[in-house]
Amino acid sequence: MTDSELKTLKDNLWHAADVLRAGAHLAANKYGQPILGLIFLRYADILYKQHKAEIEAEYNKSKGTRAEKSIKDISIKYCGFYLPPEAYYTTINDAPDDANKATLVKKAMEAIERENEKMDGVLPKEVYGQLVPEEEPELLSNIMRIFMDIPENISVDLFGEIYEFFLGEFALQEGKDGGTFYTPATVVRYMVEVLQPQNGEKKILDPACGSGGMFVQAARFMHRHNKASDEVMKFRCYGVEKEPDTVKLAKMNLLLNNVRGEIVEANSFYSDPHNAVGNFDYVMANPPFNVDEVVYDKVKDDPRFNIYGVPKNKSKTAKKGSDKKETVPNANYLWISYFASSLNQTGKAALVMANSASDAGGSELEIRKKMIEEGIISQMVTLPSNMFSSVTLPATLWFFDKQKTQDAQKKDKILFIDARSIFTQVDRAHRKFSDEQIKNLGIITRLYNGDTQAFKDLIAEYTAALKAAPEASDDKEVKTKNYWQSQIDWLNERFPDGTYTDVIGLCKAASIEGEDGIRDQDYSLNAGRYVGVVIEDDGMTEAEFKAKMLGLNTELGDLSKEAGTLEKQIAYNLKELFGE
């Protein structure tokens, strides 16, 4: 399936949400639950059919022998779950278009949960009764038929993309509430591009995992980079999420993307279900920002938070209306400490954080200073604004690398990247990274780490695309020769030797010591303090510039005189009208 065909399919499938909004008796923020449940049901049906011949062949081969296995056990081996006959999507779809279809869907979901312990309580069941209103009992049937358009030879990866597409669209529709469970896929892909997760028996933690997008993108990265499927399956994901409905979304997301792992419903501030300290190869997260009701006494002795220090108020205070217990002034640094302390000796982390954390003072400054001096912070990236459905202001990506603390050349340096001007506009209120912007930003890190071959490979990739591209196209989805040439030029203009160099306005490898170093900047981790600003060349000579400035100054003087005259005239007119 080509990218264009996949986009068309996604757009057509999204029509199901429009149909649902028009007829269902559901609140505006409840459309996602039944739709995502039907996507899962369709996925399970297709995946089972793709492996049905293998399942039956293995069953018949072992039948009657000592090694006999049940259809259920063999199905779990091939699909990761067992799909009972009453849950076949096509069978339900072919049933009469009446209110009974909601009962059939509910029974299908119950059967899947009954036969697959890990799915217990995950799938939506009761909501489908609201999709057969008395005035339009065929509504559910109409929606189910839309998902029959998904071809039965579709790959697992593409099905996962469809699920992620719906999560993203629902997040946009729901605004702030939707954003609590969804981090834009292109931001996560960039985080993964920097982390470069390796295959094998690795463990990744997300203690604020939302719908599980971090895990999915990490697994896809390994698939894209030709990791053997059996090696990818050794990769284990461990998530924590406090919202019960979002836990269900995450569990479905992992199953749809064939990602192995465990999602636990808990509050990460007060619960440590995965025994995190020093236990993980990777940590990725987009935690809630600026949480200020975390009780200090409940976290002050927790090693996840106090290795680098727990943020503390200068004096005991409590928010109005709270239980008067002392609270942490801002939980941003609880998260930051948690992620750093969860890494093993070779671990790496990537997290989204509010910009304000980069310059926070008081006890937070002391935590940041300790981390900088230890050398665990490897990179800071300022994102463009409007990348998130729930946050309009720009956020910052923090990257940790425990190995860096043992690298004498890199320990006292941090790579700063200012990506605020690098984005693709989606609509008036939302932006994203394009595929090439992710690769171009990612190559900065690769060059900084000495991987010059990656730069050559990317130039070669763009050059091949340039040769194959058309001169022009009426289809905005088709990338022309000019587009690919602009990508090549962007890289070559900034890194002409194919090696890392500081680029004003884009990137800077800053040291702790030295003039304008990190210590001189009060341990700020704001990329703008180090990267600088590009001053555009206007093409004027010094004499021309001087003449223009003098002319503008004369014009300003004339305007000031005119303003003074107008001011006097207005004062006179008011006096004539109303007297003194």
Image: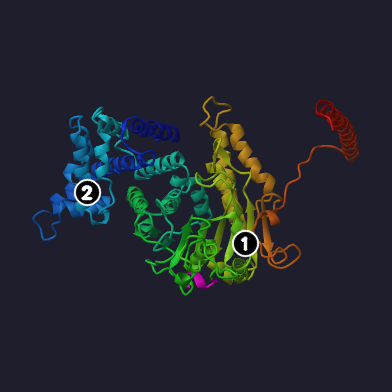
Q: Which residues are magenta?
A: 303-309
Residue 369 % position (x, y): 63, 69
Task: Identify the residue shown where x is 37% and y is 58%.
Answer: 231
Q: Which mark is residue 205?
A: none
The residue beneath circle 2 is 112
Task: Identify the residue shown where x is 88% and y is 30%.
Answer: 565
The residue beneath circle 1 is 360
**The C terminus is located in which quarter?**
top right
Q: Earlier in the sequence, mark 1 or mark 2?
A: 2
Cα separation between marks 1 and 2: 49 Å
Looking at the rendering, which quadrant does residue 148 occupy?
Answer: top left
Residue 65 % position (x, y): 10, 58
Label 1 element class: loop
Question: Any magenta on residue 517?
Answer: no
User: In the displayed image of the protein, which residue is found farthest to the front?
Assistant: 579
574 or 107, which lies in front? Answer: 574
Q: Amino acid at mark 2?
A: Ile
